[in-house]
Image (cartoon, rainbow, N blue to C red):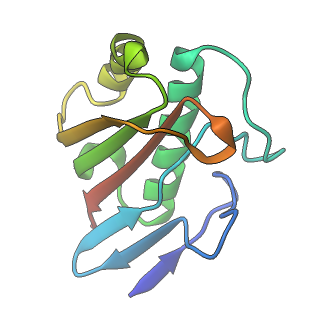
Amino acid sequence: METIQTDLAPKAIGPYSQAIKAGGLVFTSGQIPLDPSTMQVVEGDIQKQTELVLNNLKAVLEAAGTSIDRVVKTTVFLADMNDFAAMNEVYASFFSSNKPARSTVQAARLPRDVSVEIEAIALAL
């Protein structure tokens, strides 16, 4: 197993890694809309938050030596399922050529009371 860490994504705020590379796969921890430089939640609507989450996820995957194009599965956690369409619009722009398997669930509460969290599993290079 290899622990993945990059300063281009938010530091882990608990006893976990940004990602783990193992068995030809990269498993990311859930990313929330934290600005990596300030570690503060980004203000804005679900689309702005989703864009930051996916950019953070992309940075972690690249630090692991893979890319968002090699993602095979994501899990999206939403604080409000009414945000699904707006989140999905941004999500689709990141996964236009590769459409990974996905689960989307509404969570009763997310870390730091954010609106969206996304985790991924990708093929390692």
Vertical side of 11 occupied by 34: above or below: above
> What residue lies at 39% left-to-right and 13% top-to-bottom?
82
Vertical side of 48 occupied by 79: above or below: below
The residue lying furthest to the front in this view is 108
Give the image location of residue 41, x and y in percent: 74, 36
Give the image location of residue 122, x and y in percent: 27, 58
Query: Dividing the picture into quarters, in which one does residue 118 lie?
Result: top left
Give the image location of residue 44, x and y in percent: 68, 16
Vertical side of 123 occupied by 72: above or below: above
| Horizontal side, residue 123 vs residue 108: left or right | left
Vertical side of 106 occupied by 110: above or below: below
> What residue lies at 35% left-to-right and 14% top-to-bottom?
89
Q: Quadrant of the N terminus?
A: bottom left
| Viewer-nearest residue: 115 or 17 | 115
How many labels, in total? 0
| Horizontal side, residue 32 vs residue 105: left or right | right
> What residue lies at 54% left-to-right and 18% top-to-bottom?
46
The residue lying furthest to the right in this view is 38
Q: Quadrant of the C terminus?
A: bottom left
| Viewer-nearest residue: 95 or 120 | 120
| Horizontal side, residue 58 vs residue 27: left or right | right
> What residue lies at 48% left-to-right and 53% top-to-bottom?
30
The residue lying furthest to the bottom in this view is 1
| Viewer-nearest residue: 121 or 7 | 121
